[in-house]
Amino acid sequence: MAFQLSPGVLVTEKDLTGIVPAVATSIGGYVGAFQWGPVEEITSISNEADLVRMFGKPNDAVATSFFSAANFLSYSNNLKIVRMVGAGAFNAITGAGTQIIKNMTAWEQLTVALTPDMQWAAKYPGELGNSLKVSVCDASGFDSWAYKANFTAAPGTSAYVDSLGKTNDEMHVVVIDEDGAWTGTAGTVLETFGFLSKALDAKTYDGSSAYYKEVIKKRSKYVWVLADPDETNWSTVASSITSAFDGLGVFTHSFSNGADGADPGDTVTIGWDLFANTELVDVNLLFNGANTSTAAISMIQDVAEVRRDCIAFVSPFEKPSVKNDVTDALAELGVHSSYGVMDSGWKYQYDKYNDTYRWVPLNADIAGLCARTDNLTDPWFSPAGLNRGQIKNVTKLAYSPNKADRDDLYVAGINPVITLPGQGTVLYGDKTLLAKPSAFDRINVRRLFIVLEKAIATAGKFQLFEFNDAFTRAQFRNLVEPFLRDVQGRRGIYDFKVICDETNNTGEIIDSNSFVADIYIKPARSINFMQLNFIATRTGVSFSEVVGA
């Protein structure tokens, strides 16, 4: 409070309404191979339609990646994807040669020397770009232009350039699916951009850029502009033009030399590195798809265990047919962590895009079950069993373990997925990969602590740089205890105790500018083993004689 030097009324306001906030628990993360889309960049996807729009439909090379992502989205609506490509992947371009442009940042930093005919590039690497064609028209070619009907009038001179006494800056641009790879119909117009400007500084009526390279950069889903046509005065400020911008009539370019490249293999670990920073990326449920064991190890050890606010899900790395296929995969993984979860197999599902069937690993579904559990109940409930463990889109399992095999798998920390007659395909276990006997060898307990730690740590940040005194410690307890009571009321914990006073904030702790709170939790446990005892008695026997009063 400021000191007053003369009589007056000083009004102040203090906010003591702080609470422990809700935190996200259902955000998925995946790194895989796709036909299209930005490379080595995190992209948020909310449904399968968005997945197709951003990353293209599946083909034989990318089907497992595509359906892993699609399967998770069938349970949740929040998935962060990183596309990776292998050696030999290139963007389709106009002109000769090859070019790799992974994402917008790469395009903005592009310094390669461009040939005069290399004027346009497909937005992302992949063979899909070879189906593209772009046609550009300025004033002199409009009357005979094949795409004239897509525009209301011929390009001419923009109001901005006209105000400077210059002319002929406008153009129309059309992007076409020349071969039909995008739409199924060759020659379909994908995008139109009207009345763009050749002037670097041109503006629209609302003050936004009308410069053609900038508009294409921001609005096109398919192409970049790399360079202006050879020997033109385009891409200069309008005031520096003598009288008129050069006109080229109509010029049309087909794209070629796009390539999907090799399978990304172990390089997907580069994609997982993008998820490592908790301050930049919020993610909770990671899944490996059909990536390599190296990628799975990186996902668990370099991301989940470092972040400590997410769980990573893996399946056998090849389609299993017997128990040994599954246990061999666990041995290959060689990771024992409460932040990892392994299931027993792959499923056979229908590919509606190609009218065929595909084998797809189940780890995306198991991650999806956790997301669905969050929506139905809370993260600290088990995702397994007949109530919450039903797996979607299953024609058959590659391997459905019997009771004896399930016993062996569960002891090893592998969660069986089985088909029950009349009840569907079900996750029949909720273990983590932690080998040590502990409460944290169960998915629901690990996720409970992730929620508690993340939420309380988020609230605790607002205690930083306050005084470590009785008031601050009481304020912290008043934040945490109501939150834990709420979790207890929602069946997440049996009991708790918060200690944050002078007993654990000694003078030495205070003098080191530290703050200590001890939060004791009794986590709720899921039922994994059930025993039903049926006792037959004679008709004349009183039950009190058998079981007591």
Image (cartoon, grey):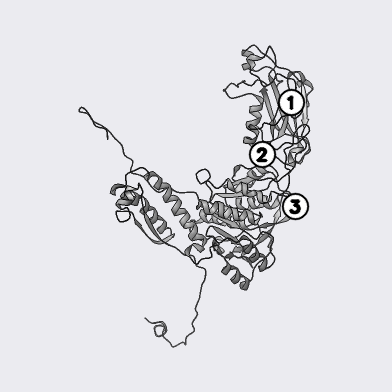
Give the number of the mark in front: 2 or 1.
2
**Which secondary structure, mark 1?**
strand
Labels 3 and 2: the sequence-earlier one: 2
Of the 4 image quadrants, the one containing the C terminus is bottom left
Label of residue 355 in the image? 3
How far, Cα to Cα, is label 1 from label 3?
A: 37 Å
Residue type, mark 1 in image: Val
Badge 1: residue crowd in 10 Å (few <14, some 14–19, many ≥20): many
Q: Quadrant of residue 131?
A: top right
Indicate left or right for 407 with 532 as reference: right
Labels 1 and 3: the sequence-earlier one: 1
Q: Quadrant of residue 14?
A: top left
Badge 2: residue crowd in 10 Å (few <14, some 14–19, many ≥20): many
Asked if residue 288 shows in the view, the reply is: no
Labels 2 and 1: the sequence-earlier one: 2
Total residue callouts: 3
Label of residue 102 in the image? 2
Q: Residue 325 location, x and y as percent?
A: 67, 65
Indicate left or right for 283 with 349 as reference: left
